[in-house]
Image (cartoon, rainbow, N blue to C red):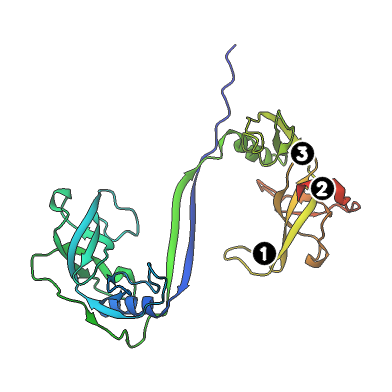
Amino acid sequence: MTAASPPEVLRAPLVVEFPFTRSLGPVQSAFLTGLREGVVLGVKTSDGKVMVPPVEYDPVTAEEIRELVEVGATGTVTTWAWNDRPRPQQPLDTPFAWVLVKLDGADTALLHALDAPGPDAVRTGMRVRVRWAAERTGAITDIACFEAYEGPGGGEPVPHDGDFTDAVTGIVAEARLDYVYSPGRAQTAYINALSERRTVGERCPSCHKVYVPPRGACPTCGVATTDQVEVGPAGTVTTYCIVNIKAKNLDIEVPYVYAHIALDGAGLALHGRIGGIPYDQVRMGLRVEPVWTEGGRYPDHYRPTGEPDADYDAYKELI
């Protein structure tokens, strides 16, 4: 007789992304608008140093600073690292160097990409200049990259009023993280059980709490959990919130209720949406049960069971 092979641990690609919208103050607005116009601006601190990129508050005194100056589009590499595998959305799609460049007239360095044929062509102290993007919109990407340069420098910083026509007042930064997620042994068993319309947790051998979803170890005692326990399906609303802002790509009308639900037999509450009841009638202690959609691998939402509300003392430790 051969031993049964362990169940396959789940793995799946996961993408986390969101647009971050930020309004700009007068200094950042002038800096980005200047890039659109082919001008690099810095700001002068209380001790006379020129910072590029500019900041709005002095890093030493924390005082507000607004004295803008124009610096050169040429500079010196202060340090660098070679990137032989550019990722999507990086400045160049061929291998390049990340460099810190102290522009002529500046006292701090700007991080950007350097277009170079290979790492042997890059060195600390080399002279470079800005390569402007063909189309500029008022973003750091208006600097397409830096390139090697052997000509004259940019000289001293020149005062600038920061006034431009149609100034940039806000930016949208796209944040994205791509990775492969593996839930591990405990959560793989939990997910597989959900596909069978069962909810399975794991009991701590020390404190005997049943954790749902399981993590493979007790967060309180720090010992491994291997004893599987089926809980629910019904449970109790321990606390909740009313959602009034519609999420993108989520086909649920607002307002709706999202709650912590302590399933019968579980040692802590999990998250779930409450349906089948007006949002203003949801309450702590409400007894609920899962509702599954055809082919769904997890409960779509929870609805009232019709049972009397649970007594507060029965769930107060799970809030």
Tell me which corner region of the image, top left, top right, bottom left or bottom right, holds residue 169. Answer: bottom left
Which residue has dot 2 on it? 315
Q: Under tag 2, what secondary structure?
A: loop
Which residue has dot 1 on it? 252
Amino acid marked by disc 1: Ile
Evaluate whether residue 96 shows in this view: no
Residue 150 horizontal side relative to residue 211, left or right: left
Circle number at residue 231: 3
Look at discs 1 and 3 and give the one toward the viewer. 3
| Viewer-proximal residue among 262 and 85 | 262
| Residue at left offset 68%, top offset 69% | 244
Residue 180, position as x, y percentages in the image: 47, 44
Amino acid marked by disc 3: Val
CA gap between label 3 and label 2 equals 15 Å
Q: How crowded is mark 2: few (under 14 residues within 10 Å), some or many (20 or more)?
A: some
Residue 110 horizontal side relative to residue 59, left or right: left
Circle number at residue 68: none
Q: In this view, does 118 lie above or below 244?
A: above
Q: Under tag 1, what secondary structure?
A: loop
| Residue at left offset 70%, top offset 37% | 201
First of labels 1, 3 by sequence position: 3
| Residue at the limit of the structure toward the left, as seen here | 151
First of labels 2, 1 by sequence position: 1
Amino acid marked by disc 2: Tyr
Q: Quadrant of the N terminus?
A: top right
Residue 76 horizontal side relative to residue 216, left or right: left
CA gap between label 2 and label 1 equals 28 Å
